[in-house]
Amino acid sequence: MPKRLPWVVPEYCEGCTSCVGACPKGILDMRESAEETPIPWLDDPSGCTGCGRCEESCPFGGIAMTAHVEEATQRFADRRPLRKESVGVR
Ligand code: SF4
Ligand code: SF4
């Protein structure tokens, strides 16, 4: 696991997909959330290098890198705050 992981902030995300395109590993996908727009998601955080390019690419503060890797991994695994019926929309 990397030393840090992206923490998606759905309230700030505008669904622009900039972060998806910025990820050199191509591991971010857009998913339906409880917000109006889809949000980026990491189905497999173990593939993340923690480089922070997703955070840097976001004009809206929709991603914050966090050192709380365990919590972030669990949140991705629990698929919170995605919609239950969420499917990929990329
Ligand atoms: S930190 Fe880097 S590798 Fe991880 S999701 Fe963001 S851009 Fe991709
Ligand atoms: S987190 Fe930022 S860059 Fe990524 S889709 Fe949302 S608004 Fe766009």
Image (tube, rainbow, N blue to C red):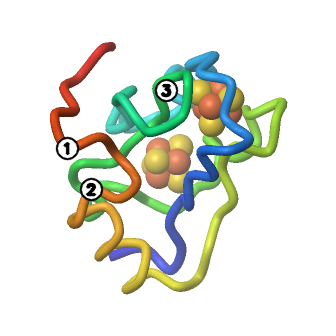
Label 2 secondary element: loop
Q: Report the residue marked by disc 2.
A: 79
**From what the image shows, is residue 33 above or below residue 42?**
above
Neighbourhood count class around disc 3 (C-alpha, 10 Å): few under 14, some 14–19, many 20 upward: many
Label 3 secondary element: helix
Q: Is mark 3 within 8 Å of ligand 2?
A: yes
Q: Nearer the viewer, mark 1 or mark 3?
A: 1
Q: Report the residue marked by disc 3.
A: 20
Residue 66 vs residue 33, the one in the foreground: 33
Question: Residue at image x 44%, y 81%?
Answer: 69
Tell me where residue 32 appears, x and y as whole percent: 36, 29
Identify residue type, mark 2: Arg
Distance between the Cα atoms at labels 2 and 3? 18 Å
Identify residue type, mark 3: Val
Question: Residue at image x 34%, y 45%?
Answer: 82
Residue 84 - label: 1
* N-terminal-most mark, 1 or 3: 3
